[in-house]
Amino acid sequence: MEEILEERHTLAVLVDNEAGVLARVIGLFSGRGYNIESLTVAAVDQAAHMSRITVVTNGTPMVIQQIRAQLERLVPVHKVVDLTLQAPSVEREMALIKVACSGEKRVEALRLSDAFRARVIDTTHTSFVFEVTGAPSKLNAFISLMRPLGLVDVSRTGVVAIARGPEAM
Amino acid sequence: MSGREMTGAAIVLKALKDQGVDTIFGYPGGAVLPIYDEIFKQEGIRHILVRHEQGAVHAAEGYARSTGKPGVVLVTSGPGATNAVTGLLDALMDSIPLVCLTGQVPTSLIGNDAFQEADTVGITRPCTKHNWLVQSADNLARTIHEAFYVATNGRPGPVVVDIPKDVQFATGTYVGPGQAGHKTYKPQVKAPTDVIAEAVAMMGAAKKPIFYTGGGVINAGPKASQLLRQFVEMTNYPVTSTLMGLGAYPASGDNWLGMLGMHGTYEANNTMHDADLIICVGARFDDRVTGRVDAFAPDAKKIHIDIDASSINKNIFVDLPVIGDCAHVLEDMIRVWRSKSVQTDKPALETWWRQINTWRARKCLDYKKSEKTIKPQYAIERLYELTKDRDTYITTEVGQHQMWAAQHFHFEEPNHWMTSGGLGTMGYGLPAAVGVQLAHPDALVIDIAGEASIQMMTQEMSTAIQFRLPVNVFILNNEYMGMVRQWQDLLHGGRYSQSYSEALPDFVKLAEAYGAKGIRVSDPADLDEAILEMINSPVPVIFDCLVDKKENCYPMIPSGAAHNEMILGDDQDGAEITEEGKMLV
């Protein structure tokens, strides 16, 4: 049988900002064996008590369709949009990256951070904390460049995404 | 809407009354005492005291499935809630509308490992359609009304409302049910007209069609069953059903092929396999139905009518999804069929029926008759013959007896057959029978059981006695967990590991101990008279029917095999079971 390839999809999910809603979404993924590559959540409309969840997942087209249908039938879910299918959209992720080094390596780290438009948000005589924003692949590239220079800690937000153009989701 | 001030416990009872509830199944405990106090003070809602919380949920399921109304359950915190979990998942898998109210420790103690505390919303989250923890008496009425809305709209299912004890004591404002509708949960009941038109066109063009119907038809109400019957008559297409859908189309109907799937009929499965169009109405292509997925109906286009979009393309890829309520969709399809004067391909259908009738001629449900021992199939046949002229409701436990009941008891009407299909819960049948009998006091209610399953919920006989419910437990006693043994025969070299029912109770004495009637039969010649004695008994009966110990349930699609690779009997070798198939038991 022909193998059906897995695809990476970014889903935006608008939910009621109520207790347990994140557990419902995460429980759905773990309970049904779906992958979560990244998941972010925050309130986006305090007055309407709404939060937005961005999930990056991968699976065959049939599984992606299932994930969407399963999310849509959760009671506190207002809307689910597959931003990968409903292209074009933009994706961003932010990372805080700590690098401990001195001498030549310190200069090199600073030079590379400049090329990646990373900002230095903390520094000591022996370390930097960089803030870098971009597509996940850009963050990956920066992190791998920092590894030989003394990478000690990484904190990433996970992907947030939004459709291009004037329309709301 | 201006509301009235009352305690949380009073709000619960008022909300239930305003939702039209007449019966609750429950068991008291510390965290629900204020609600029980309100029950004591009122009339109008009957409380049925069960003997185990799982029994309460199954009884509510029986009540719901036989009436179409939501079942209501009330249990305490901690073990009360955890005992209810199996029943909740059972209702979720079979799409049964239930509202389960659970007591909870006071809000100030939540998270402190208090006495009889459990994270009920956490535990029941994957076992319910939705659940709520109510943190204020002011939110209580609205939440209960919302709970009824969610349980009964869209694909029905169980919901839990967890109510801390301080919320039950606190004073809050009562609000009535108000307008139907929901902020976010708005299931689509009508399908778009272009989709209906396409479905009708596909149906008109079919040469080898079949209706494959399921529990969704029953859940969509009696009208859906009527529409299905009408559509089958208009088209003259054959019809089969899942375990859950039995009764939607009458077993006496000319176009009926019997149940499909693992223990379905030879004609139903072969018709599915060779079809060029499958019209799935309210079924979900479950693994018991499809057999080997990549060999399932290879030449068929598939139309899938389902109210739950997540059922579409889950197991089997379909050509045309029709998302909507079965009754609405069937009604629209029939209207379009008529307005366009669609004609079926009569010569092709004639050829198709000729082929189907050769499969029917195999008489796959036949078995070797015996004058010495009662064959289990014979017992069900006689039970059917002697009860068919009455208003009879059948519940079952889980196992061989369940499949024999599905094969040999013939259902003419919807809502008369309650069985645990999706979850396969042993112990379901007796409490479900209690729920059915409460809803239909004058009906004949029979739990077709096995000697192993019945022991999982026997205690509910005490409930039947207390509420004077003349339910009948008809045990096909073969002294084995028969379905386990059948699989051990098939896959594990006949090594009957732990499947013998050792140390069985004397079921006649057990019945008598409860104050019920016990009947035991082992001779086929005595069977009819004994069944009549059971039917005519004014008190509950446990009927110990000693059947052939060796009989296995056929026909059968071994797991991992295709629909056209059925085993018809003990003496026939079927398809080799693959390693993958062994996993699918």
Image (cartoon, coloured by chain):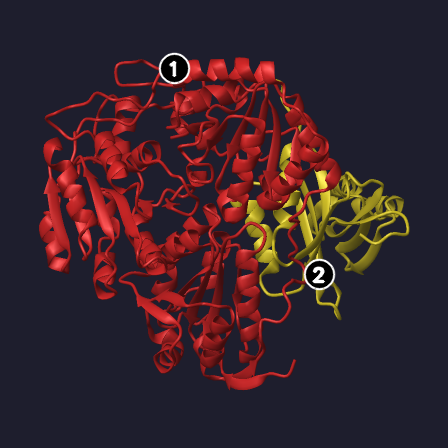
Chain colours: A yellow, B red
The chain containing the residue under callout 1 comes to: B
Residue beneath disc 2: A51
Quadrant containing the C terminus of chain B is: top left
Q: Secondary structure at mark 1?
A: loop
Q: Position of residue B139 (x, y in %)?
A: 57, 75
Q: Position of residue B279 (x, y in %)?
A: 58, 30
Q: Is residue B49 left or right of residue A167?
A: left
Q: Position of residue B555 (x, y in %)?
A: 34, 23
Amino acid type assigned to the residue bearing label 2 in the image: Ser
Closer to the observer: label 2 or label 1? Answer: 1
Q: Residues within 10 Å of mark 2 (few under 14, many from 20)?
A: many
Q: Which residue reaches farthest right?
A: A166
Residue at the (14%, 37%) spot, across then down: B527
Residue at the (26%, 36%) spot, across then down: B385
Residue B143: numbered disc: none
For residue A57, what is the image quadrant?
top right
Residue B565 in view in this figure: no
Q: Is residue B429 left or right of residue B105?
A: left
For residue A104, what is the image quadrant?
top right
Q: Is residue A83 left or right of residue A26?
A: right
Q: Position of residue B246 (x, y in %)?
A: 42, 38
For residue A122, what is the image quadrant?
bottom right
Residue B575: numbered disc: 1
Amino acid type assigned to the residue bearing label 1 in the image: Ala
Could you say which is closer to the camera, residue A23 or residue B249? B249
Could you say which is closer to the camera, residue B336 or residue A118? B336
